Amino acid sequence: MAFFRTLSLLSRNRSRTVQPSNLSNSVRWLQTQTSSDLDLHSQLRELIPEQQERLKKLKSEHGKVQLGNITVDMVLGGMRGMTGLLWETSLLDPDEGIRFRGLSIPECQKLLPAAKPGGEPLPEGLLWLLLTGKVPSKEQVDSLSNELRERASVPDYVFKTIDSLPESAHPMTQFAAGVMALQGERKSTPILVLVPDFTTRTHVMQVESEFQKAYEKGIHKSKYWEPTYEDSLSLIARVPVVASYVYRRIYKDGKIIPLDNTLDYGANFSHMLGFDSPQMQELMRLYVTIHSDHEGGNVSAHTGHLVASALSDPYLSFAAALNGLAGPLHGLANQEVLLWIKSVVDECGENMTTDQLKEYVWKTLNSGKVVPGFGHGVLRKTDPRYTCQREFALKHLPDDPLFQLVVSKLYEVVPPILTELGKVKNPWPNVDAHSGVLLNYYGLTEARYFTVLFGVSRSIGICSQLIWDRALGLPLERPKSVTMDWLENHCKKVASS
Ligand code: CMX
């Protein structure tokens, strides 16, 4: 096989089975699988035919079953409440929050292998879970860690692409440019091209993407998932290297720290950024795990999925997803929260009174801004990703003044004010309300960088689903749009009938 998958079958080991109360169907079907090798790719190869059959049956037996009615409100309201996407890796319940292949965050913390007993889950374990629906053994996770390290080499032209941007460019811009460059070319094969003056010159035009190479050669659609798997695993392996390059370039005088061949994914990312304390490594494992996936409709996941539906390769699709993540109503809220909290402290002091904080929240709202870190498009309760970060803080930094401000004062003050507005559907904190405070405590104080961390984590969820998109042969996404004229006429017709 032309692909450069390097993991060998090291030993035989049976997967752990799990018995949480409400396992989803996806986890249940996968528990019945008996394959026990350490190779993720072989496991997927076994699982895919069964899921293809499942989808076929769903289409043929239940294709005409209705899932709801689309209203004008939904069309005008950003498609809220419209069920319109298949997304296998996770499902978001408005009250309970996210479940990864049926497992809640506390269940993942309990069941997924950790670096040491009782520690936070290793993100590689979550990747295995998202891809296979099985809780992996520690040996499987170690094997995947090893594979990701082996895939983590980043060609020099990626760094040159980033270097061609001004250092003042937003870290997300530099990161997304680096990811786009990853799709580029490793071995140059000059080809002749015609230029406008009708002369010819040599030009290099090849891609790193295994999917694109295979597509150009004419791969059969039933095999699309294989090069997509190769690209996805390589992309997931490489994004921490690109992301930490951006960080060190902007904030640490370009002093780059290479990958450590003894560390797992989360710890290595922390290490390459320049943070080697065991607690920061644990935080990074938790951070990467909980930010990875949030079902399919959020802007970054949906963008990645949409772009990939045109058979764009994983690098192109994920770079597009990052550009969506960089918006302040989505992933940029990660940075906005800390900047906002710092501006509150600057104005009111660390020992601000509740009344001063209320006044600042109202000032924010009255100036037409949102309070970052609160509200959600789907969730209707406090985000469990917020809660688990709060628990981490209670364990490791209970006396940190910013943590005190976030958990006690903001939690007390903001939800009643947002409720008073009368239009906010969820006044409770989301994932972004907490993460910046934790990172800041461990010395990662550069808030403008935070969304890049979110982006690294999202590669795991978006690429896992992308592999399944290809395996299941999901089609080009192309919903129908209408004009206001069309809607008005339609409503008139409905009223008259
Ligand atoms: N502060 C002020 N107003 C808010 C608000 C907040 N935190 N959350 C919602 N609202 C407003 C909306 O702007 C909207 O106002 P208009 O009708 O005037 O446009 C109204 O309340 C209704 O919005 P909604 O249905 O409750 O929420 P949406 O699904 O439209 O938006 C979200 C969801 C996340 C964009 C919104 O809650 C928000 O802007 N929050 C702050 C930014 C943030 O934290 N984003 C991160 C979300 C998590 C993530 O993706 O990372």
Image: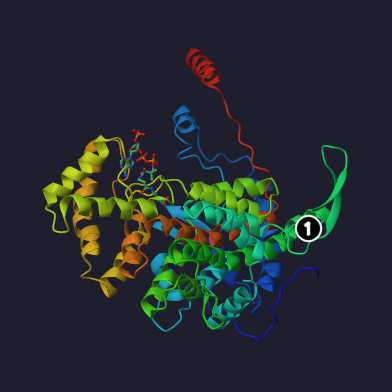
Q: Is residue 197 left or right of residue 406?
A: right
Image label count? 1
The answer as to whether callout 1 falls within 8 Å of ligand 1 is: no
Coordinates of residue 467 in the picture (x, y in percent)? 65, 59
Ligand 1 location (quadrant)? top left
Does 65 sit above or below residue 212?
Answer: above
Along the horizontal axis of the image, is 221 left or right of 92? right
Give the SS element for disc 1.
Answer: helix
Residue at 66% from the left image edge and 61% from the top image edge: 157
Residue 244: x %, y % from top left: 50, 66
Residue 392 found in image quarter: bottom left
Residue at x 68% of width, y 78% of height? 7
Q: Residue at x 20, y 59 (%)?
A: 408
- How is the structure coloured here? rainbow
Q: Nearer the viewer, residue 114 or 209?
A: 209
Residue 85 in view (yes/no): yes
Quadrant of image for the N terminus: bottom right
Which residue does the image show at 13% across and 58% down from the upper left? 351
Q: Is residue 431 visible?
A: no
Residue 387: % across, % down: 32, 62
Amino acid type indicated by mark 1? Lys
482 relative position to 275: left or right: right
Name the residue that disc number 1 marks. Answer: 213
* In-front residue for pair 315/449: 449
Q: Horizontal placement of 22 versus 473: left or right?
A: left
- Viewer-side residue, 351 vs 404: 351
Q: What percent of the width, then of the height, locates residue 457?
A: 50, 62
Give the image quarter of residue 419: top left
Residue at the outermost bottom position: 11
